Image (tube, helix red, strand yellow):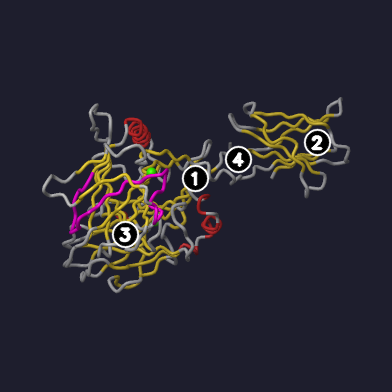
Amino acid sequence: MNRARVGKIVSVAAGLAVTGIAGAETVTLLESFEENIENVYHYAAEGERRITAFAQSEINDYDQITDGKKALKVSFEAISGWKQDFGVLLSPESTAILEGVVEELEEASELGRYYLLYDITWDKLESDAAWSNNPLNFGGHATGIQIEWRGGNQMVTMTYDLGAGLPEGFLLALEGDNGDQTAMRFIFNGNSTLPMDIYVDNIRLLDTKPEGGVTEVSVLDSFEKGLDSLQQTGPRVIDAPTINANALYITEGLGSAKFVLSDTSVGYQKDFSIQLDIYPELEGILQLPQEERLQYSLAWDWIVETEGATVNWFQETLAPVGPGMGMTESWAGDGNVKTRVINLGMVEWDFLPIITVFHNSSRPWGTPVNLYLDNLRLINTGATNVQESFEIFSVERNAGGTVTLSWSSVEGARYAIDSSIDLKSWLELDDDIGSEGDTTSFTTPADEAEKTFYRVKQLTE
Ligand SMILES: [Ca+2]
Ligand SMILES: [Ca+2]
């Protein structure tokens, strides 16, 4: 807070970090299955198909229509194991939007900004499936991300951070009559001997960055000194985590957290948890209404060191299963870094802020497997661009009974001015003053009080 005394008038300039821009994210609808479903096609060859019908459905008994009035209904005869079942060709317009994002991310990769989302609802009425999953294959690429469904008539939202999952040289495969449409392939896995329906709707792109937002990344934990937030939870984890100093398995600073998983792998199992309530930076954010948290993402890096273990695949899943949390990410190979990203607006968090991490792999491994975690960070794509030297540098009383305030400003910003005679109650004088460049001035009638305080706030939009 800067104060400058000029004559009888004291100016107070405070650069307030305005958080009121939440909700200013952009959602672009890419496919909602409203007009027709001519762009939906079998991927499996004839004779190998397990889908009996595609339909444009208006049934909404489980809230499976998440946008508009219709959803895509896919009827399976039965499911046993993996198959690339069907594809959805996106319109040329939607393809162009995604291509623009991919190009932008290739130039400057940014985590936590662009998410590809869609909703799948499983209809368990007839089936005897207890679980199923759906890996995302998008633009001709396996992304290593999959939805986990744990039963019931549950809607799960695919939440894919385009920045985190962008392989080098990522290009969208183009198909369609004019070669200008990219596609999403829907792969399913599960076991049901009876018919099962799934509904897909609302394929969309979320841009979490509000107009004028600035991305701010703060490291919550670099696992250098203490590992207070980490706790082993399953019998596969040998001992408490330790701090690793081997630079090969560090992505930030001088240390990382190391877990050792026993060689007696027993498939899908809960291994450890991350207690988020020890990080004061998250407290206020997790208390915001869910829809106001979209600009915030949580990310960390994980590395698997297999040594001589016979691991050829490894997956990490987060729980509890809630929207945006029931996601599995696959191993990036021995010693390679994977970055996990969770959008905090996609998670309900009506439970204790704890992330439980599950792993799954082939077995047996032969030797223990080392797992490293580093750089747990909070990404805010909607931080405000408040300059550090923000101050009112001149307050002048003019001959005509007016006062002119001048402050250091930034190009393109907007400002509001309040006045007060007691620094307690404030009167808004103007809430929409455009920046005049490095310096902005505002003239207002002088108050009759002996002292008047002024406050300038930089607005975010
Ligand atoms: Ca729809
Ligand atoms: Ca570290």
- Circle 2 sits in a helix, a strand or a loop, which is it? strand
Q: In the image, which is nearer the foreground, mark 4 or mark 1?
A: 1
Marks 1 and 3 in Cβ contact (< 8 Å): no
Q: Is residue 90 left or right of residue 368?
A: right
Mark 4–mark 3 Cα distance, whole angstroms, equals 47 Å
Q: Earlier in the sequence, mark 4 or mark 1?
A: 1
x and y percentages locating residue 55 in the rendered image: 28, 45
Q: In the image, which is nearer the foreground, mark 4 or mark 3?
A: 3
Q: Which mark is residue 388?
A: 4
| Residue corresponding to mark 2 | 6
Mark count: 4
Mark 2–mark 3 Cα distance, whole angstroms, equals 66 Å
Front one among 120 and 47:
47
- Circle 3 sits in a helix, a strand or a loop, which is it? strand
Residue 97 higher or lower than 249, as above or below: above
Q: In the image, which is nearer the foreground, mark 2 or mark 3?
A: 3
Q: Quadrant of ligand 2?
A: bottom left
Mark 4–mark 1 Cα distance, whole angstroms, equals 15 Å
Q: Earlier in the sequence, mark 2 or mark 4?
A: 2
- Circle 1 sits in a helix, a strand or a loop, which is it? strand
Q: Which mark is residue 216?
A: 1
Mark 2–mark 4 Cα distance, whole angstroms, equals 22 Å
Q: Is residue 281 magenta?
A: no
| Circle 3 Cα neighbour tier, 10 Å, few/some/many (<14 / 14–19 / ≥20) | many
| Residue corresponding to mark 3 | 149
* Amino acid type shown at disc 4: Glu
